[in-house]
Image: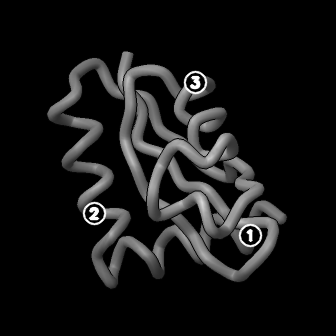
Amino acid sequence: MFYAYVLASQKKDIFYYGSTAHIELRLQQHNDGLVTFTSKFRPWKLIYFEVFSTRSEAMKREKIFKSGKGRQWLKNIITNSS
């Protein structure tokens, strides 16, 4: 299984969009400072994810998350679930 995910920095109003095969491990890597971009904005919280059967599907979804429409859609999802 593969995941497209969204993290929120608990330090600053920043989101990070990614994809991985091991979501728990990846979150730990972000919080341990092992991912260059995210190391400055730790700690991170997983706020949204979707599951896919292939890496390609997860990466396509990650790309959508990073688009203007995708960011707006995620903002609506996150706001309505809070």
Instruction: Quote the CA–CA distance across marks 2 and 3.
Output: 23 Å
x and y percentages locating residue 18 in the rendered image: 40, 50
Above or below residue 77? Residue 2 is: above
Q: Amino acid at mark 3?
A: Leu
Q: Amino acid at mark 1?
A: Asn
Above or below residue 6? Residue 54 is: above
Quick check: marks 2 and 1 in contact, CB under 8 Å?
Answer: no
- Residue neighbourhood size for the residue with mark 1, other residues' Cα within 10 Å, grouped as few (<14), some (14–19), many (≥20): few
Please tell me which residue is depicted at 74% across the width and 51% down the height of the picture: 45
- Residue neighbourhood size for the residue with mark 2, other residues' Cα within 10 Å, grouped as few (<14), some (14–19), many (≥20): some
Q: Is residue 74 left or right of residue 24?
A: left
Q: Is residue 42 left or right of residue 82?
A: left
| Snapshot quadrant of residue 23 | top right
Instruction: Quote the CA–CA distance across marks 2 and 1.
Output: 20 Å
Return the residue nearer the eye: 37 or 6.
Answer: 37
Q: Which element is circle 1 on?
A: helix
Q: Which residue is mark 3?
A: 25
x and y percentages locating residue 39 in the rendered image: 59, 58
Q: Which element is circle 2 on?
A: helix
Q: Which residue is mark 2?
A: 64
x and y percentages locating residue 56 in the rendered image: 15, 33
